[in-house]
Image: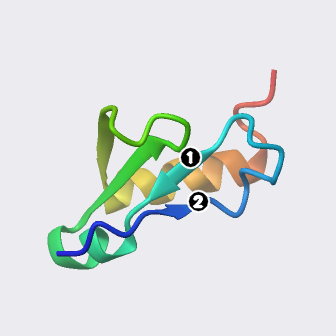
Amino acid sequence: MTDEWIKSSYSGSNEGQCIEWAPAQVAATGTVPVRDSKDPQGPALAFGTTAWTAFVAGVKAGDFNA
């Protein structure tokens, strides 16, 4: 498995609130690992693909806007 992490395209370029994910791990394990790009040695969260898909759909729909 590769350790390649990719910055989310939704994170922008301001080096602020950014997340990364590891697509090869998704293919290998069926989980979506997510971490803070400013702390690559810190913890990563792992989501099942169904949960992650629902979360992304909610973000796109504006379900989490304050």
Q: What residue occupies the far top of the structure in this picture?
A: 66
Compared across the picture, whether 36 is left or right of 56 comes to left
Q: Which residue shows up at 28% across the image and 66% down it?
A: 3
Of residues 34 and 47, which is closer to you in this image? Answer: 34
- Quarter the C terminus occupies: top right
Q: Which residue is mark 1?
A: 19
Q: Which residue shows up at 75% across the image and 50% down it?
A: 61
Q: Are marks 2 and 1 in contact (CB under 8 Å)?
A: yes
Q: What percent of the width, then of the height, locates residue 32? A: 34, 58
Q: Determine the image quadrant of residue 7.
A: bottom right
Q: Which residue shows up at 46% across the image and 34% down it?
A: 39
Q: What percent of the width, then of the height, locates residue 63? A: 71, 37
Amino acid of disc 2: Lys
Pick whichever of labels 2 and 1 is earlier in the sequence. 2
Callout 1: SS: strand
Callout 2: SS: strand
- Quarter the N terminus occupies: bottom left
Q: Which residue shows up at 72% across the image and 50% down it?
A: 11
Q: Residues within 10 Å of mark 1 (few under 14, many from 20)?
A: many
Q: Which mark is residue 53?
A: none
Q: Determine the image quadrant of residue 10.
A: bottom right
4 shown above or below 36: below
Q: What percent of the width, then of the height, locates residue 58? A: 64, 46
Q: Which residue is mark 2?
A: 7
Q: Residues within 10 Å of mark 2 (few under 14, many from 20)?
A: some
Of residues 1 and 51, which is closer to you in this image? Answer: 1
Amino acid of disc 1: Ile
- Gap in Å between the C-alphas at discs 2 and 1? 6 Å
Q: What percent of the width, then of the height, locates residue 5? A: 43, 63
